[in-house]
Amino acid sequence: MASVCGGCLAMMDAGVPIKRMVAGVAMGLILEEDGQFIVLTDILGSEDALGDMDFKVAGDAEGVTAFQMDIKVEGITLEVMRQALDQAKAGRQHILREMQSCDPPPAKQLSQYAPRIRRFNIDPDKIGQVIGSGGRNIKMLQAAAGCDEIMVSDQLTGLLEVRARTDEAALAGEDIIVGFLTEPEAGAIFRNVAVGSVMPFGCIVDFAPGKSGLVHVSELDVGRTADPTTVWKAGDKIDVKILEYDKASGRCKLSRKAVMQEDSGVASASAPQPVEIGATYRDVEVVKVQQYGCFVALNSQVQALVHVSELDVERVSDPASLFQAGDRIDVKVLDKNKRGQLQLSRKQVQIDDNQKELSENGNGNVPSAAASQRLSTYT
């Protein structure tokens, strides 16, 4: 029974969470031929050998959790059993009070020498993705997290185990696996990620295990970077933000500049909203004029072309004769082609505005002169 008490204290000292302390005590019996008896509490080895009963009772302060009995007589009465249990309860509660006053008290966290195991579930269909060809991915994830082992405990439920020597490594293993399986999202920020390679046009950054993207030279800094190779080298750590993610190709467009702007408060309080098909954008800036149309900035990160055929309801032969960089116009997003390029129209905004004005004047009001002139142009 001492092993029950010592085992409970040892588990608590190791930080194993238990609801209540458990103690044990061994009860003995001396039974005379005339029926007289004495119940012994916490018997010694000799009392066990020479006595008539060895009754071991273990439990907590609220009740019995286990018991075992050996007897050398033909049987015992209910009175003997009742007294043995009552004495065992008193003895157990006394031992529990002594255990609770131990010095130093049991630890409330796992021992630094105890191994750590974290269990969590993933999509069972993605188990193969975690393992990889010949175990390549799972070995990469183990190395990245610094954990001892990543195991698939149940393929049907997608239960994984990460085994490590420290809480940090076990938690890192779980975070890295979840990040590895999560598709990148535009707007997500990754801190302290490694530069994989540097080229004149930008840096390739490994922002998650098995995931990398290009930080174009124009997105490396708020100021102009002439040659990234003179500033960065492989292994450098930077913060990046995902500007765009192409799910079909898996390509990510990253920006260090956007993170710097947000951290310094230069950028707006909220990230630019995704461009919506069919939406009208008012008072956007013309950033460049070409013979085939005008490039406009829909927000701080998205620029697109208004083709010459969509610049006005009337034919435009030379956009440079009507527009220049810095002008403000209204445009509507018509569609996005297979290459992901937005198709904008200023002409459609003019048509929509005209129809709206005519509709509002349908209640008996006289159309404005401008609306009448536009109507004659369209018809």
Image (spheres, rainbow, N blue to C red):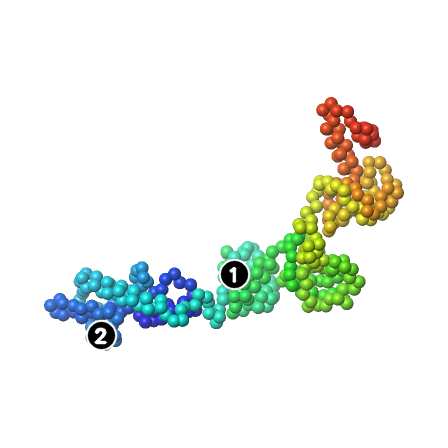
Q: Residue at x 83, y 47 (%)?
A: 325
Q: What residue type is labelled 1?
A: Leu
Find the distance from the CA under tag 2 to the CA under tag 1.
52 Å
Res. 47 mark: 2
- For label 2, the crowd category at 10 Å Cα-Cα, with few meaning under 14, some 14 to 19 and many 20 or more, is some
Number of the label disc, if any, that sits on residue 32: none
Residue at image position (31%, 59%) is 62
Residue nearer the viewer, 139 or 30: 30
Can you identify the residue that label 1 sits on? 160
Q: Looking at the image, which residue is at 74% across and 58% down?
A: 222
Q: Which of 202 and 271 is in front in this view?
A: 271
Amino acid, disc 2: Glu
| Quadrant in which the N terminus is drawn | bottom left
Q: Where is residue 281 in the image (x, y as percent from the top left)?
A: 73, 42
Locate residue 300, reporting x and y percent. 73, 50
Tell me: residue 370, above or below residue 234: above
Which residue does the image show at 33% across and 69% down from the upper left?
98
Quarter of the picture containing the C terminus is top right
User: Among all residues in the image, which is located at the extreme top?
Assistant: 364
Query: In the image, residue 85 lies at what x, y percent?
Result: 24, 63
Asked if marks 2 and 1 touch (Cβ < 8 Å), the reply is no
Left or right: residue 199 versus residue 137 is right
Task: Name which of mark 2 and mark 1 comes first in the sequence.
Answer: 2
* Residue 236 sits in quarter: bottom right
Determine whether the residue tagged by mark 2 lies in a helix, strand or loop: helix
Give the residue furthest to the left: 34
Is 79 drawn above or below residue 291 in the view shown?
below
Residue 4 seen in this snapshot = no
User: Which of the two discs, 2 and 1, sits closer to the camera?
Assistant: 2
- Report helix, strand or loop for mark 1: strand
Give the camera-side residue of 252 and 152: 252
Tell me residue 186's x, y (percent): 66, 52
